[in-house]
Image (tube, grey):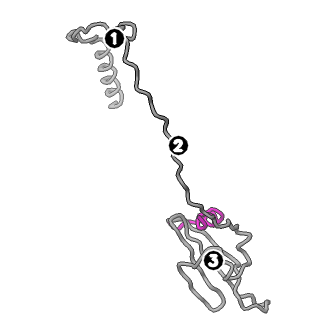
Amino acid sequence: MLKSRLLFALATIFLLSACAGAPTDVPKSGPAVTPDTVDAAPLAPAAPVAPVAPVVIATPVVIAKPKITSQQLLGQGGAWVVAKLGTPVFRRADRTANIWRYKNGHCVLNVFLYEDENSASSQPRVLHFDARDAYGYNTDREHCLAALQE
């Protein structure tokens, strides 16, 4: 009921404003000045414009880090990970596992390095990693890896 009254009131206001017509107290002005009605006096010649030399901005050479993928990260040792991603912002060493955290403004990458009981090498290897966004939700690991290498 309230909606129908509101719609009726709005429709009435719209119709009344359409019937009001144009205001009558608008001052009359002369004809518009267009290129056809401008004084035909010749213009003074323009001053010659000196040529401008192009501006060359030297850009610094940026050597981009190679992008690594999740397939390249899995199975690698800690030294390789540090060489590619740098020093982690957080490290935790458990009895059989190490957890390394890398983060920037886009994401957090948790890398889990485990010692292989069947291997003679004592260096832990990446067997799992996960990626989280800035709010702590799971996010795409490839995008996070790329963002950490920029």
> Along the polypeptide, which appears first: circle 3 or circle 2?
2
The three-letter code of the residue at mark 3 reads Val
Q: Quadrant of residue 144?
A: bottom right
Residue 132 location, x and y as percent?
Answer: 57, 68
Which residue in the protein does label 1 denote?
A: 33
Which residue in the protein does label 2 denote?
A: 54
**Left or right of 91 in this view: 24:** left
The residue sitting at 70% across, 69% down in the picture is 70
* Farthest left residue in view: 25
Between the residue at mark 1 and the residue at mark 3, the CA separation in whole angstroms equals 74 Å
- How many C-alpha atoms fall within 10 Å of the one at disc 2: few (<14), some, or many (≥20)? few
Q: In terms of depth relative to the viewer, which is nearer, 115 or 85?
A: 85
Q: Quadrant of residue 4?
A: top left
Q: In terms of depth relative to the viewer, which is nearer, 65 or 88?
A: 65
Q: Is residue 98 magenta?
A: no
* 27 lies above or below 90: above
* 12 lies above or below 61: above
- How many C-alpha atoms fall within 10 Å of the one at disc 1: few (<14), some, or many (≥20)? few
Q: Secondary structure at mark 3?
A: strand
The three-letter code of the residue at mark 1 reads Val
Which residue in the protein does label 3 denote?
A: 111
Q: Which residues are magenta?
A: 135-150
> Along the polypeptide, which appears first: circle 1 or circle 2?
1
Q: Secondary structure at mark 1?
A: loop
